[in-house]
Amino acid sequence: MNYKILIALLFHSTFAFQACNTTKKQEVEEKERVEVIVTEEIEIDSSDIVEVEEEVVINIDIFHTSLSDFISGKNKSYFDTIVSVEDEFWNKFSKEIEEDFSKISERRLSKMSEWSNTSFIDSSIDTSLVFYPFSGPDFLHVNVLYPNANEYILLALEDVGNMPNWRDIGSRSTRKHLENTNNFLRDIYLRSYFITKHMKIDIKEEEKISGVLTSLYWFLSRTDHQIVTVERVSIDKEGNLIDKTDQKGLDGVRFHFIKKGEKKIKKLTYFSCDISDDGFEEENPELFIYLSDMRRCNTFVKSASYLMHYRSFKDIRQIVLNKSISIFQDDTGMPFKHVDNEKWDVKCYGSYVKPIKDFEKNYDIIYQEDLAREYRKGSTNLPFSLGYHWRDASEQNQMLILNK
């Protein structure tokens, strides 16, 4: 005789969505509920054989997913009852984003995606955590290169920021905020990386946006993801990730999300932080503990202003060496002299040339003769350009450094 036991477990979680009224600077909350139902069907027969079937039903957070589609110009229908955005404006705004995103998809992203699927890291490690220091809010490119990763950790100086209260700021300010978010991405469109001074102007000096939060929603939407939960997070003194309950401490945001049509929940965590040695010691020592306890990962570095070439960034450099299964970086990342050939295999892509003129006053520090010699041994072409040498693909360089 067979017996079937049906067990249904219902889990609830809530996220208090903090919105910032840009005129009154008053916070409000909107709460969304997420339900995950786990159903187990257990069959027991006379042979005492137990079979378990598990079905996981994931309820998408409609508000936050609709918010990401709204910001990225995909769909505004959810917000029609919240704020009036005229069709004439929306059609123009949406069309402009579609055209610009189609261009970078054709010229860069599709080539990156095809290369990642056929010529990048082995399938045995490509589902691992991806660590992306000096990232800005650039989820776009790290997701294209590592689409199968189960988690992404991004670290940068820029504030997390807040989302406007659309109802309170009204139609005119909403339109302006949508335009400002798209303009914030101008260097990603053109160059594939954020320029720090441009972000500083947009966030701090001209206050066009309050931080990187809206761009993270934009990237999740444009990479065809749906949001399950969003939470503001921090790190306690023991290096544990915790909910952020006040204005004190390290500021971060974490998204749980899934690819449309899939059931695998992934995580994206962004921290606004200083990862220089002084930053770790004086401002956020808890972050150093958190990263030191981080599980093994694939590390991605590009357009990182050569910061790990300086003595003041030796701690983050050591974290990369200690925690990485693989490192994919251009010459702005960890200096080649720190790669021990007995511990790492190196594959060079593109060609190594002198850094761009923006950094010429520090050529004596950042130009790497040993890396130039390594490239003279031979390298493989890349079908895409990514980083500071975006104008000329023949001057593009990347290295895949694999732990033996």
Image: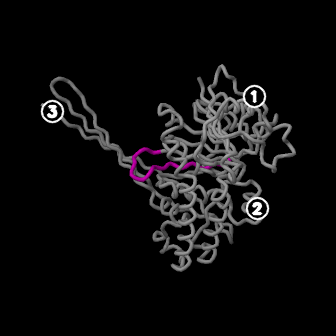
Amino acid of disc 1:
Lys
Disc 1 versus disc 3: nearer the observer: 1
Amino acid of disc 2:
Ile
- The quarter of the rendered structure image containing the C terminus is top right
Q: Which residue does the image show at 50% across and 44% down from the upper left?
A: 147
Q: Which residue is mark 3?
A: 2
Q: Residue furthest left?
A: 1
Q: Which residue is mark 2?
A: 201
Disc 1 versus disc 2: nearer the observer: 1
Q: CA distance from mark 1 to mark 2?
A: 35 Å
Q: Pick whichever of labels 1 and 3 is earlier in the sequence.
A: 3
Q: Is residue 163 above or below residue 312?
A: below
Specify whether residue 290 is in view: no
Q: Residue furthest top?
A: 342
Q: Is residue 81 above or below residue 315?
A: below
Q: Which residue does the image show at 45% across and 50% down from the upper left?
A: 259
Q: Which residue is mark 1?
A: 337
Q: Secondary structure at mark 3?
A: loop
103 and 41: which is toward the camera: 103
- The quarter of the rendered structure image containing the N terminus is top left
- State the image quarter where residue 7 is shown: top left
Q: Which residues are magenta?
A: 249-265
Amino acid of disc 3:
Asn
Checking the image for residue 303, the label placed there is none
User: Within 10 angstroms of label 3, few (less than 14), some, or many (20 or more) residues?
Assistant: few
- Circles 3 and 2: CB distance less than 8 Å? no
- State the image quarter where residue 52 is shown: top left
Could you say where residue 122 lies in the image, as x and y percent from the top left? Answer: 50, 32
Q: Secondary structure at mark 2?
A: helix
Q: Is residue 214 magenta?
A: no
Q: Pick whichever of labels 1 and 2 is earlier in the sequence.
A: 2
Q: CA distance from mark 3 to mark 2?
A: 68 Å
